[in-house]
Amino acid sequence: MAPYQFIERPTPFNTKGGSTLPIFAVTPAHIETGTIDPIALDWAKKAGYRAESGSLLLIPTAAGHLGGALFGLGTNPSEQPYITGKLARSLPAGDWHIETAPLTANRLSLGFGLGSYRFDRYRSDKQAAATLMIPRDADGADIKRQLAGVFLARDLINTPTNDMGPEQLEAAFRGLAEHYKAEMSVIIGDDLLKENFPLVHTVGRASADAPRLLELRWGKKGHRKVTLVGKGVCFDTGGLDIKPASSMLLMKKDMGGAANVMGLALMIMDAKLKVDLRVIIPVVENSISANAFRPGDVYKSRKGLTVQIDNTDAEGRLILADALAYADEEAPDLLIDMATLTGAARVALGPDLPPFFTDDENLAHHLTEASLETDDPLWRLPLYMGYDKDIRARIADITNAPAGGMAGAITAALFLKRFVSNTKSWAHFDIYGWAPTERAHSPGGGEAQAIRALYHHIRRG
């Protein structure tokens, strides 16, 4: 069975064998020492080709036809392990294979696949693309499932809210569940109050598209319990504490946590990992209406803690609070939550390096190890309890928006920590879910972050 696709697209890979054109992936040393194909070397020297990182030189045949390509890796290929992503966007359409490359087969194939991504759902000028043969010593099935997970996250984030509101996100979630024969349930609208999800209802009640809680279960009871929680704010106006126009431009991506846990769940289910998987996604649109929640309001959470609303634009932690409390009731072995939660995380680490928070030293070590092994960047930030006093509220148990603005990513993580008490290991990921500029393995736009590292960690057991 092929991995689930939200948007169907042709594979970036081919299986045509000898009919494919060769690519010689080289460093400057290969050119200097002449350790490549003689025809390619002769053409490179005539063209003054230096094999700089990401550079491409097409090679003609003696008859003047396209005969192959040289692709530069720069002096230190390990610095850009997925540099072959550039090939997917620079090669002419056709079928290719890597003839030589000082990279592992998995790295070069995964890099090409990641870089092949295009979001052309709304474009009429769809163009043919190059395809690459996966080398025999690469794990083709695992490469394809990782790409499927990444592409799912990217597709969901890139889709504008008029086509990715709460109802459509539920439909995508249902499609994923049905593809892998997982159990799925949904609680919608005022039923959230009956089922004790008051904060999810509070944040989403002002939208014409009702708030909801999505849940998926897959796997076998008795296996390790892994629960994933993702923030599903399909659009964030900021509520009554409305965002300025410039800050609202990218708010279709505020469901990036939901998109990423769905991508991770895809990888887990497609690989048939021996886990008891549970996925919980609170889905809302933070809108403005006569019944919108207000600054100064106080609401009781599912856990019983009361929350003072000091900023309606700090809504993500509210819906996560109910979802995490719900997840924690089953005391999973591993609980992961992902959310596009704070601007403070971006100020601290930028858009490409998502922080994670955990008080489990062993888990932190293994996540860091997985990050390095998969070249999926992560950085641990501290759950510094000295700041816990900052989330205390004047007339309620806690506030959703501490005054002062300092250590915002840490205080948000400490807020969430209040709702996790039974789980054996918990980690919170404050992702950006967006690539502001083109990179070798991404054309820019919606992005999967940390899920390849998490998949690697969970797969390793």
Image: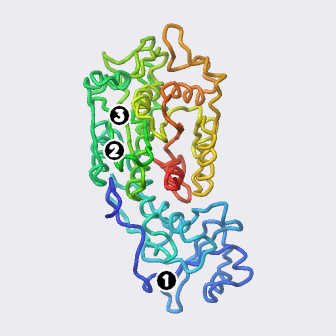
Give x and y (percent) for residue 265.
Answer: 40, 49
Q: What residue type is labelled 2?
A: Arg
**Mark 2 closeness class: few <14, some 14–19, many ≥20 residues within 10 Å:** some
Going by the picture, which residue comes out furthest to the front?
Answer: 222
Looking at the picture, the colour scheme in use is rainbow
Separation of marks 3 and 2 at Cα, in angstroms: 17 Å
Residue at horizontal 39%, vertical 30%?
Answer: 326
Look at the numbered disc 1 and give the secondary structure of its residue.
strand
User: Which residue position holds label 1?
Assistant: 66
For marks 2 and 1 on the same chain, the one whose residue lies earlier in the sequence = 1
Q: Quadrant of residue 285?
A: top left
Q: Quadrant of residue 4?
A: bottom left
Q: What residue type is labelled 1?
A: Leu
Determine whether, in the image, residue 40 is placed left or right of residue 300: right
Residue at horizontal 38%, vertical 68%?
Answer: 128
Q: Nearer the viewer, mark 3 or mark 2?
A: 2
Determine whether, in the image, residue 78 is placed left or right of residue 290: right
User: Which residue position holds label 3?
Assistant: 283
Residues tagged 3 and 2 counted as in contact (Cβ below 8 A): no
User: Which residue position holds label 2?
Assistant: 217
Give x and y (percent) for residue 227.
Answer: 43, 41
Q: Which amino acid does label 3 sit on?
A: Val
